[in-house]
Each structure stands twice: as C-alpha cells, then as structure tokens.
Image (cartoon, coloured by chain):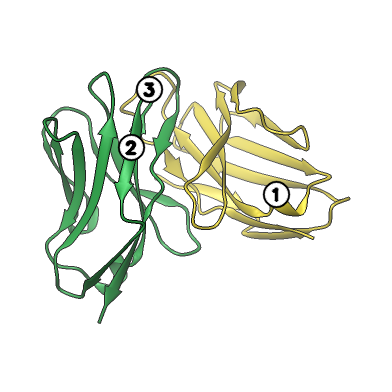
Amino acid sequence: AQSVTQLGSHVSVSEGALVLLRCNYSSSVPPYLFWYVQYPNQGLQLLLKYTSAATLVKGINGFEAEFKKSETSFHLTKPSAHMSDAAEYFCAVSSNRDDKIIFGKGTRLHILP
Amino acid sequence: DTEVTQTPKHLVMGMTNKKSLKCEQHMGHRAMYWYKQKAKKPPELMFVYSYEKLSINESVPSRFSPECPNSSLLNLHLHALQPEDSALYLCASSQDLGDLKETQYFGPGTRLLVL
C-alpha cells in the first residue's frame, strides 16, 4: 500500500531564505504524488503534482518539486520564502487500490521576518 | 472556473439539532468527496460519490448522511452530533474516479462546532 512521510511537523525559515519541505513515499508501483497547501482557515489548494511526465515539476507561487525514484522522495522547494508562504503543506499520493488520496501528516511552514 | 463553494462557512449546533452542509461545483466533475479535518491533522476521507451514486463510505457513523441531488451538488446532513464531531468539513471534486492522476479541487470548508 502507498504511503507518504513528511519529515518535520514544523519548519521555520527566514524571509528570503530557501524553503525545503521533505516528503518520502512508499509505493510498489510508480506513484502519482501531490503537494497541497492550506492557508489558515481555508481549504486545500494544489501546488503541483507528479504524473511521470517530468521529474522536476513546477507549481504555483514559485514552488517546485523533484521526483527522485532512487531516494523515494518528492521534496518541495522554493528559492526565496515570502511571508505569504506561511501555511500548512501536505504531501499526498494516489492510492492504486482505491480512489483515494493518502495524505501525509503535514508540515507547518513558519516564515521569520 | 476551478471553484468549489461550501455553505455555511461556520456552523454552531447543539447535539439535538439537524443541520445540513452544502457543496457546489460547476466544473462538470463527476466525483465529489466529503472530508473531515481536525486541527493540525490531515483531511480524513468520509464519503465519495461518483456519477451521483455513493462509491465509498469510510465507515462513517450514521449521524452523518450524505446526499448527491445532482452532479453539481453535494450535501451532508447532520443529526444528533457529538462534541467530538467538531471539525472543518471539506468538500472536494475531481473529473472522475479511476484516474490516479486526477486533481481533487477543494472548497474552503465549513467549520462546525457542536455544543
């Protein structure tokens, strides 16, 4: 069965610094992977998704993620953090056994002025 | 238009009340979902509808009753809830089931407080 693990429930970076949010997946078949963002008191918004077309995926708001099969990782990065990036970020994988998305536990990103 | 709307935004109800949450999308999506999200946790799937028929029920208590009157609308009827049911209820939709690459589009949620 597929699963994702997000390393670090809280990550703090300074404004202008690199953002790196870690996600590792477990899957017996090629996975489809997603990063969602949830701003306070809002629903989830898709940042980007990996569908095997390209290993480096660019998303909205300057975020990108690289699929690395050898490391079973799909880490999310942004070169320069903005205060508006403060939110909860969820990595997710599509389950190949049923029509579900399996979410990681989430990482809260804090931006320091 | 990639918008999923949900009403109301906030709801406070007593344990003996009956209320309904509403969700609407006009993207022509044929799959719709209800999730429950507790604070600082990921969303938990409750129900999935496909072509207006219930496809998945994640063993949700019967005090939650979903309904899909047409392809654009999804309701969640609430009756005799418990305080532990207080949470953010998220609706989502996707083009269809069966395609693992499909994106789910989420609404802003209804924040429910049960007293």
Mark 3 → mark 1, Cα distance in angstroms: 28 Å
Residue pointed to by mark 1: B85
Q: Is residue A36 above or below residue A14?
A: above
Q: Amino acid at mark 3?
A: Ala
Residue pointed to by mark 3: A1
Q: Residues within 10 Å of mark 3 (few under 14, many from 20)?
A: few
- Quadrant, the N terminus of chain A: top left
Q: Amino acid at mark 1?
A: Asp
* In-front residue for pair B25/A79: A79
Q: Position of residue B38 (x, y in %)?
A: 57, 52
Residue at 68% over, 46% down: B21
- The quadrant in which residue A11 appears is bottom left
Q: Nearer the viewer, mark 2 or mark 1?
A: 2
Q: Chain letter for green? A: A
For chain B, the rendered hue is yellow
Label 3 residue SS: loop
The chain letter under disc 2 is A
